[in-house]
Amino acid sequence: MQFKIVADYFEKIEKANSRLLMTDLLAELFKKTGSDDIQQIVFLCQGQLAPPYEGLDIGMGEKFVEEAIAKISGYPKKEIEQKFKVKGDLGLVAEEVLKKKKQSALFSGELSVAKVFNNLLKIARAEGKGSQDLKIRLLAELLNSAKPVEAKYIIRVPLGHLRLGIGDPTIMDAFAINLLKEADAKLKKEIEDKLKEKKVDKRKEEFERKLRMRIRELIEEKYNVHSDLGSIAEKLKRNGLNGLKEIHITPGVPIRPTLAERLPSAGEIVKKLGKCAVEAKYDGFRVQVHKYGEKVTIFSRRQENMTPMFPEIAEAVKKQVKAKDAIFEGEALAVNEQTGEYLPFQVTIQRKRKYDIKEMAKDFPLRLFVFDVMFDDGKNLMGLPFKERRKKLEKLIKKGNDIELTKSIVTDSPKTVDKFFEENVGKGLEGIIAKDLSAPYIAGARKFSWIKLKRSYKGELQDSVDVAIIGYFKGKGARTQFGLGALLTAVYDEKEDMLRSIAKVGTGMSEQQLQDLEKILSKTSVKKKPARVDSELEADVWVSPKYVIEVRADEITKSPVHRAGKKEEGEGLALRFPRMISIRQDKKPEEATSVKEIIKMFKQQTHVKIGEEK
Ligand code: AMP
């Protein structure tokens, strides 16, 4: 397939002003793509060359990309730099200089998707002495044959951001559109039966919509246990919906994590779950450990490969895990070896680094508190009730210093839950997580199989909120020098895959953080509000959503300017006095707090207040 077709679609998608249109365009592109190219095109849509968990970093510094552009265009490097300063996007610079070149020279050939992909892959894999020169040459080779629009997107891949705003949910929706005709009689009947019960008008449209949603659900179920949309796309292309049967839970390929709901009190938790397991909530890194034979891979909750950062955990897994192959989860936490004291998150987070790992591991060794198991010697355990999985987990882990099971009790008494909560908070832990004894492992979703209860902070919302940055405002007064004064942030609407505005955050960040934020955000700036963003406020600079920050706020209030919850509540919801606590590098915008959760927190907050007034 010619890369020009892909680039033209990317351009249309970039200009699309609704998610619906974006999805339709993507579906059209996938339809035109053959089974040999589909995997590569899906990866390119995600701005990568392999599933994210492989951590293949294409990273090429701006300077080297500028050099490649200078090389093929004949412009001096200084001039390319100058143009970059004006446009803020080297993709646009490459497009512009190639348009000019077009008038003087002919292109040397047509680019195929495979050629583009393979050169980019070679760039990503180039290592060691002379690798920078090689990267520049490989990129220049592509640019030499590229048409201006192709150059725009080729350039953006090694820079790490396509600026298209295509999220994984949009990709899955596009697959579903193309599979509508594939639905077999059984699936169609399932939808028919549902519709019969409801007696809806517009039956045909409703039927198609429901069928599409159901197909999307079937795809997502597989994606949840096998985070590789490229390989899923290929199987769907080759075998239609039947291709899904070929996708299994596999050690080495991360499973999307279960997420916790929240309730405001022990009483409500017991009312919801009845007799349940209650565990201490450790405030560290969530890790998913994959052991296959002697190999161990440790994934973060974002599915990044963190194995090199946690050597002592990988070693401990080899010693303490009895099964040959296993997938299990836990929280890794820095513990003071002398006192047994749990150290705060700020200390643990320092372990997420690329350098001085050995020294850090000595100063702040991690202990892994395991809480679930999904795979044990060839058996998929995800469907077993939690009670059974916990028993398997107890058998899986040998006694030792580095890995232990989370502290856990089973009870149906709110009083006991409260006591356990107080005990753990007293030891410096975050609170508790209650678990439904009969629930399977629900990958990638927030259902009431886990419910968290965290210690509350006076005058603050009980829990912090994770919000995605969708734009920013240039600094005023003393902040003019930083180029950034406040962030425009949003929460995630899971149903419609949209980011809806919730707060302007201007406090809580240091001067250094303001500068750093401006630096990373300006790299993802886009000309207009992205199609997936819902905001009435106009940011000075819009960004393609990529970063998430954790904020605390005093409360959630109704708001005439913000859009979170507007559909459901009639009026938008906003955070009052939001302040940034940290940049959540472990989360993507789709993992920000959801609109649904915000509405729930809003209701719980009034609920607690009414309780207090009595
Ligand atoms: P939160 O990030 O506040 O939504 O809380 C859920 C997170 O708590 C999980 O993703 C884990 O990282 C962490 N956690 C700590 N202790 C436990 C535990 N015992 N069971 C499950 N998750 C835990």
Image (tube, rainbow, N blue to C red):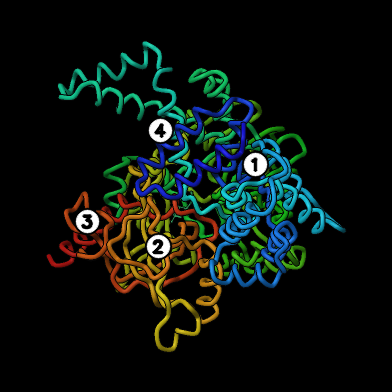
For marks 3 and 4, give the one nearer the viewer: 3
Foreground of the two, 509 or 483: 483
Tag 3 and tag 4, C-beta contact below 8 Å = no
Question: Residue furthest toward the front?
Answer: 104
For marks 2 and 4, give the one nearer the viewer: 4
For marks 1 and 3, give the one nearer the viewer: 1
- In the picture of the structure, the residue carrying the numbered disc 2 is 422
Q: Secondary structure at mark 1?
A: loop
Foreground of the two, 296 or 208: 208
Q: Along the polypeptide, which appears first: circle 3 or circle 4?
A: 4
Q: Along the polypeptide, which appears first: circle 3 or circle 2?
A: 2
- In the picture of the structure, the residue carrying the numbered disc 3 is 603
Find residue 438 and name its label.
Answer: 4
Question: Residue furthest toward the bottom?
Answer: 478
* Label 4 neighbour load within 10 Å: few <14, some 14-19, many 20+: some
Tag 2: amino acid: Glu
